[in-house]
Amino acid sequence: MSRHGFLDVCLQSHVAGWAMEDGGPAVLDIFINDERIAQIDCNYPRPELAQFNILPSAGFFFHFPSPLSPTDVASVRFRSGEHIENSPSRQHVRHLDQMLHGVAGGRGLEFGALDRPMLSRERFDVFFVDHASREDLVKKYQAAHDVSLVNPERIVHVDFVWPGGALDAVVGGQRFSFALASGVIEHIGDPIGWLTQIASVLEPGGRLNLAIPEPTMTFDHRRRLTSPAEMLDDHLRGLQRPNFRQIFDHVTGVAPLGAPAPDRETRLDNIRRAYGIGQAAERDGQYLDMHCHVWTPQSWLECWETIEALNLAPLRIDHMFEPLPETAMFVVSLVRT
């Protein structure tokens, strides 16, 4: 009997990978700390596996019932008890350690958790913030019909709905000792304003930890980087949603890693498509979920130098971590001054 499989990702919210048994998709057992919590079928579509002579239907993606803690060990095993390659794993610990840098307890906020929260309410005094209620988010992602993006059934309860404006009013004047946001700030039209609003509800010395996509590891790898001037312009305009420039840049610039460069006609078609999408969004006042901004660690520091020089946000950088391959993100830890 032949068995092959690999655990690609183990984060606090989920595991993902692929496995085959006797030439077909495998059935796997999921364990946390050697306790079996689920049995799953490998039927998650992974088209990119075909280039490695692996069944593109042999992928798996499993949400944990509750986010893992730094002491948890996850493992994925065949029914025989044999581990797939890269299992057991504590891969999630590196990301959690970074995201919890300087967090010593107290009450906190997590922004944009959707179906993949960093923290569980069982272990942390955490409140979830998003731009819409859970009910509205479920409707939005059900309409998208793409559980590889977000699984609507797993979206967390949203404690504070913050579509924009004063965050202090949304949280009723409460103050918090920390805030976390993983893969959120790049979607924000005006990052400076967004950071300032979060800082307004942090206690002095409170911590804001951000996980930001590293473009060389993501579909942003061909895009130009956000400049300090663009961040300032977006802030002066007080953007509450992606504007035409950000939409056009996203649509024309994103590309899967490893994809061949498009030919001239494809590029022209994409330019025309992006122009139409951006025009329609501006005309109709429509919110489109885009990567409005792109930073590397170095370009983030260059932008932050401008923010700091102009005293635009009551925050200072305490630490910045190198990007992690398993998350394709780098983490920045900011402290409320």
Image (spheres, rainbow, N blue to C red):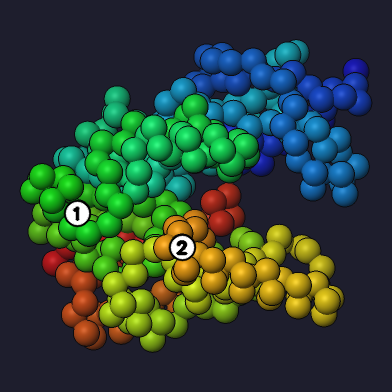
Question: Residue 76, percent across and down?
Answer: 64, 25
Amino acid tagged 1: Leu
Q: Is residue 123 visible?
A: yes
Question: Residue 275, percent across and down?
Answer: 61, 74
Q: What is the crowding at mark 1: few (fewer than 14 residues within 10 Å), some, or many (at least 20)?
A: many
Quadrant in which residue 121 is drawn: top left
Task: Please determine whether, in this image, residue 93 is positioned above or below residue 225.
Answer: above
Q: Residue at x 51, y 22 (%)?
A: 32
Q: Which residue is mark 1?
A: 167
Decide if residue 235 is on the left or right side of residue 78.
left
Q: Residue at x 31, y 60 (%)?
A: 333
Quadrant in which residue 45 is drawn: top right
Task: Please determine whether, in this image, residue 126 is positioned above or below residue 318.
Answer: above
Q: Residue at x 67, y 19 (%)?
A: 40
Decide if residue 149 is on the left or right side of residue 6.
left
Amino acid tagged 2: Asp
Q: Is residue 323 visible?
A: no
Question: Residue 69, percent across and down?
Answer: 39, 32
| Secondary structure of residue under mark 2 | helix
Q: Which residue is mark 2?
A: 284
| Secondary structure of residue under mark 1 | helix
Question: Residue 99, percent across and down?
Answer: 37, 50
